[in-house]
Amino acid sequence: MDPVIIVGAGPVGLTLALALARQEVPTVVLDEGPGKEEPRPARTAVLRPDTAALLERLTGTALDHHGVRWTGWRAMRRRQVVSEIAFAPDEPAPVQIAQHAISGLLRAAAADQPLVEIAADSRLDSIEQEPSGVTAHTRGPNGTYWRGSYLVGCDGTRSTVRKLQDIRFPGRTAVERHAVAALRTELPWTDQALLHRMPPWRSSGPFAGEVTARPLPDGAWRLDWLLPPGKDLVTPELLVARIRETLAGWTDGAAPAYDLLDTGVHTVHHRLARRWRDGRVFLAGDAAHLLGALGTQGLDEGLRDADNLAWKLASAWHHGPHEALLDSYQAERRAVVAARLRATDQALPGRRGGGGLRHIVPGTARGHDALLTDGHLGRGALGAPGAYTASPLAPRHLEGEIPVDTPRGAPVSDVRVTAEDGSFVRLRDRLGRGTLLVLLIAPGTGVWDRKHWVSAGVMPRLAAAVTALPHPAELLVAESYPGAPAHSVLLVRPDGHLVTALTGVRPAALYAAAEATVGGAVEEGVGVEAGVR
């Protein structure tokens, strides 16, 4: 079968290629550039724990070696600390990393992956779809025709794929603007991110009263100053003056010595493509959506696009197209991003000093600060990974279903599990293989050798039920899971979202849930409460 064509060799496109390769699907990545990205210290991303784990899984490299994992978070208003959070060494925390470092890790992993071909200097100029596949033509030194089973546009804001498919991209322009500086200096804290609103040294000029500081490797920092609405020019002289003023304010004296590495102006747009699928053509990342105001990060959502789409394309590639499964990509991901954009747009007036937050956070500026903290830390409506609660793949009315601390459709907690070979691993390590995960909660198993309990109790019956599922699945065992009683069974999608939790071993309900998850219809009466349709 023909490979999947991926247009764009940025972090989202390369992540999708590696995720498909992990599921034994070949890809061709059409790279408009020469095959490398110019280092820009001021162009960085904040990765939440789930997307950081995804990249570490695909590259086999700990991101701490290339970025900085935050040790804490501090929010200040004027001279007062309004909130402070410290992350324990083993606690998931955001990672600040340069985008060229992300691309470098992904390119290195792709170079070692025989199922990934990167075609440099290949600019897409046409797409033709047929019932059996897609043909793409590129121009440039390596211009040629490419034949693929599917095509995914990961080609950014000005996506050629989106334009060729005549997909509208409505939204708002310049929702926020930030002056950005990457510099090496010594601040009074280490590896801790800071949000400082209304600093007391605020002066006149094209700067609003807000600045963030986020740590980078080798003693460097990224500083972002929120700019007021409009198109006021940020001159080098103004930026240098603001750097010195800010550093002096944070150190209560003269500005410490610093080495300016890079500068820029970052403009946040909010846009959402009308369609994310057109036959065998899909959109992902900035080609499908633009967001990032109020501390949220656009790259996170692009990586989640790739994670969601990869296992569905892999299933179609190996087992034949299933339209309901492929359609669910747009239904799930577009709904999550649209909700994030709505929440951010509602919160923007409060950040700018208006009253638009009153229906969300009653009262004070402290509530506004808490909402901003959620956006930066990846929590709450502004930042938490989306849950596919209204997914067309969600099973309905399963007999024996119980609630756990993870809502249906939300990402599962990263607990320690015992794999089928008896090894202890993290649950996230088993994701992205194209298989469903069936997790039995069995207290006490962690202190016994697997051979003593694998054939005891409910295990034989559950193992037989897993073998009979309509999609490949892996059986795992955990000592505990938040909110799950002993002997309950959790079904988890290949991208780590919870399908259901069942009380005990219920083969019919488990089968029905698995069939719905891969886009199949639940047979009448199978694992469904009597009388419910």
Image (cartoon, helix red, strand yellow):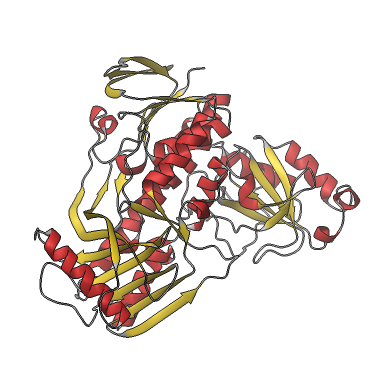
Who is closer to the viewer here, 258 or 509? Answer: 258
In this figure, what is the number of numbered marks? 0
User: Does 488 sit left or right of 336 as displayed?
Assistant: right
Q: Quadrant of residue 446?
A: bottom right
Q: Quadrant of residue 237?
A: bottom left
Q: Residue furthest bottom?
A: 80
Residue under the image location 57 percent in, 49 percent down = 496
Residue under the image location 30 percent in, 85 percent down = 79
Q: Is residue 530 at all visible to an observer of this figure?
A: no
User: Does 135 sit left or right of 442 as displayed?
Assistant: left
Q: Is residue 254 at all visible to an observer of this figure?
A: yes
Tell me where residue 478 appears, x and y as whole percent.
73, 57
Tell me where residue 371 appears, x and y as whole percent.
36, 72
Residue under the image location 37 percent in, 70 percent down = 186
User: Does 128 sit left or right of 230 as displayed?
Assistant: right
Tell me where residue 188 appears, x and y as whole percent.
39, 76
Who is closer to the viewer here, 230 or 41? Answer: 41
Tell me where residue 190 appears, x and y as whole percent.
44, 70
Who is closer to the viewer here, 230 or 380? Answer: 230
Q: Residue furthest top?
A: 144
Whether residue 150 is situated above or below residue 62 in the rendered picture: above
